[in-house]
Each structure stands twice: as structure tokens, then as C-alpha cells.
Image: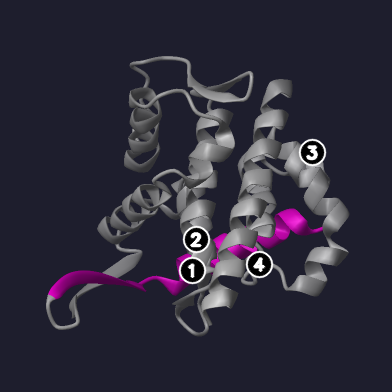
């Protein structure tokens, strides 16, 4: 997978890596973030549309050629009608697993097999290409640059920033920087839905659901600490 062709969920996953410490940040809600990215890209491509708040496939045979996006598209098709905010949470770890497998196959991740409690087989993913994750982060930071007109930022780059900010990814923005860039983030959120007016509503719904999922995951992690 060439560096310039990562899907939105893959870019968000790579963005979550702290390349200095070689570890994932925001792990408690990473599956929600990756799923939100997949939903947003399918909506931007016009393969999922909004029908009174319901995420609705427009074509039962359409494919993207991306295993992660097509997997989610099949899941939505085969399930009962559900709202966007439900899909941010429902079986979201399946999308995260698919992204990891895709990036491992592309050489961006390495996979180590281990056993939990010495019995249960498990996979441990490590970052094999820190430079790729760094490039994804720098591209997102360029979208945040106030000197760059919002109109010059692609809808995909805008969505990366909007969703990463909603997930409070520190690899992109420290808390104080989120406050400073608040207006720019709102502009990029609108830009994420630029391909069609109706898409702006979808992006905002997914982003709002992402904020709620992040808050719930953070509260749960704090309570169990």
C-alpha cells in the first residue's frame, strides 16, 4: 500500500502511534475512532447516505477495493437499519482488527504472536514503519496550518483532523492546542462534508458520536484505574 493511498481509517490508526515511544495513544477508544473514519470515508464516497438519521447503503453491489471499507459496507448491508452513532460503536473492534491486518500485510506493522496467561494465543502489533506514521501526522498538521486556506485542504485531510481532535489524540494536538485551534477544527469539520451538503450532517453526527464514545471510554478507564 503506497504511502499516499491509505484509507481514512488506516490514517487515523497510524496517527494514533507515538513514534517516539513506539506505542499507541488513546487505545481505550481507538476502535471507535477507526470505525468513525471508515463510516466517514464511505459517506464521502457516496456509498453510505443519510436516510433520516439512518446509515443507508446506496448500492448493494458497489465495492471500494479496500478490504476494511468493504468489510464495513457488507456489515451495514447485512444488518438491520441503524443510526450513524450506533455504527460508531457496534462491533467496532472488527474494523480495527481489519485495519491492523491490512497494515501488517502492507509492512507498516509487525506482528508478534504471544500467549495470554501462557495459554490463549494473541497477536501483538508493533509499528514497523515509524516514518510512515510521521508522514501521516505531518500531513494532518499541515491541514491545521492557519495560513493554508480551508478550501485548499482535501475533504479526507479535513476529516482526519476533525475526527482525531474529537478523539483527543495527543499525537496530533495537546489539550491546550485543541483550544487554540478550535475555530480551525470546526472549519475543517465543515470541510469534511464539502462533497455534498447532506454529507455535512453525516460528518457532524459521526463526530458527535465519536466525542461521546471517547468520553465514555475515558471515564471507564479512569474508574478502573
- Label of residue 30 in the image: 2
Report the front residue among 184 and 107.
184
Relative to 198, residue 222 above or below? below
Q: Which of marks 3 and 2 is nearer the N terminus?
A: 2
Q: Count neighbours of disc 4 (C-alpha within 10 A) and say few if under 14, some if 14 to 19, many if 20 or more.
A: many
Whole-percent x, y for residue 93 in the image: 38, 53
- Decide if residue 147 is in sight here: no
Q: In this view, does 32 lie to the left or right of 126?
A: right
Residue drawn where x is 40% and y is 37% of the image: 69
Q: In this view, does 13 lie to the left or right of 126?
A: right
Marks 1 and 2: CB-CB under 8 Å?
A: yes
Q: Earlier in the sequence, mark 4 or mark 2?
A: 2
- Name the mark nearer the viewer: 4 or 3: 4
- Label of residue 40 in the image: none
Q: Distance between the residues labelled 4 and 3?
A: 21 Å
Whole-percent x, y for residue 189 in the image: 74, 43
Q: Distance between the residues labelled 1 and 2?
A: 5 Å
- Residue on which the image places disc 4: 172
Residue drawn where x is 44% and y is 43% of the image: 90
Q: What element carries label 3?
A: helix
- Residue on which the image places disc 3: 151
Q: Which of marks 3 and 1 is nearer the N terminus?
A: 1
- Name the mark nearer the viewer: 4 or 2: 2
Q: Which span of residues is magenta-colored?
A: 120-145
Q: What element carries label 1?
A: helix
- Residue on which the image places disc 1: 27
Marks 4 and 3: CB-CB under 8 Å?
A: no
- Name the mark nearer the viewer: 3 or 2: 2
Q: Distance between the residues labelled 3 and 1?
A: 32 Å
Amino acid at each position: 500500500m503506497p504511502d499516499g493511498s491509505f484509507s481514512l481509517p488506516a490514517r487515523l490508526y497510524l496517527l494514533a502511534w507515538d513514534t517516539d515511544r513506539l506505542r499507541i495513544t488513546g487505545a481505550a477508544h481507538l476502535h471507535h475512532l477507526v470505525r468513525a473514519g471508515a463510516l466517514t470515508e464511505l459517506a464521502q464516497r457516496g456509498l453510505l447516505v443519510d436516510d433520516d438519521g439512518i446509515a443507508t447503503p446506496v448500492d448493494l453491489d458497489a465495492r471500494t477495493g479496500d478490504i476494511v471499507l468493504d468489510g464495513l459496507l457488507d456489515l451495514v448491508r447485512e444488518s438491520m437499519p441503524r443510526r450513524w452513532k450506533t455504527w460508531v460503536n457496534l462491533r467496532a473492534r472488527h474494523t480495527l482488527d481489519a485495519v491492523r491486518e491490512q497494515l501488517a500485510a502492507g509492512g507498516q506493522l509487525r506482528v508478534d504472536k504471544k500467549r495470554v496467561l501462557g495459554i490463549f494465543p494473541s497477536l501483538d502489533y508493533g509499528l514497523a514503519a515509524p516514518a510512515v506514521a510521521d508522514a501521516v501526522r505531518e500531513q494532518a498538521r499541515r491541514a491545521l496550518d492557519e495560513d493554508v486556506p480551508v478550501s485548499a485542504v482535501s475533504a479526507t485531510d479535513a476529516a482526519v483532523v476533525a475526527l482525531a481532535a474529537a478523539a483527543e489524540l495527543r499525537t496530533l494536538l495537546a489539550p491546550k492546542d485543541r483550544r487554540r485551534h478550535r475555530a480551525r477544527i470546526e472549519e475543517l469539520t465543515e470541510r469534511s462534508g464539502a462533497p455534498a451538503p447532506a454529507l455535512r450532517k453525516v460528518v457532524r453526527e459521526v463526530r458527535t458520536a465519536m466525542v461521546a464514545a471517547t468520553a465514555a471510554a475515558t471515564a471507564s478507564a479512569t474508574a478502573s484505574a
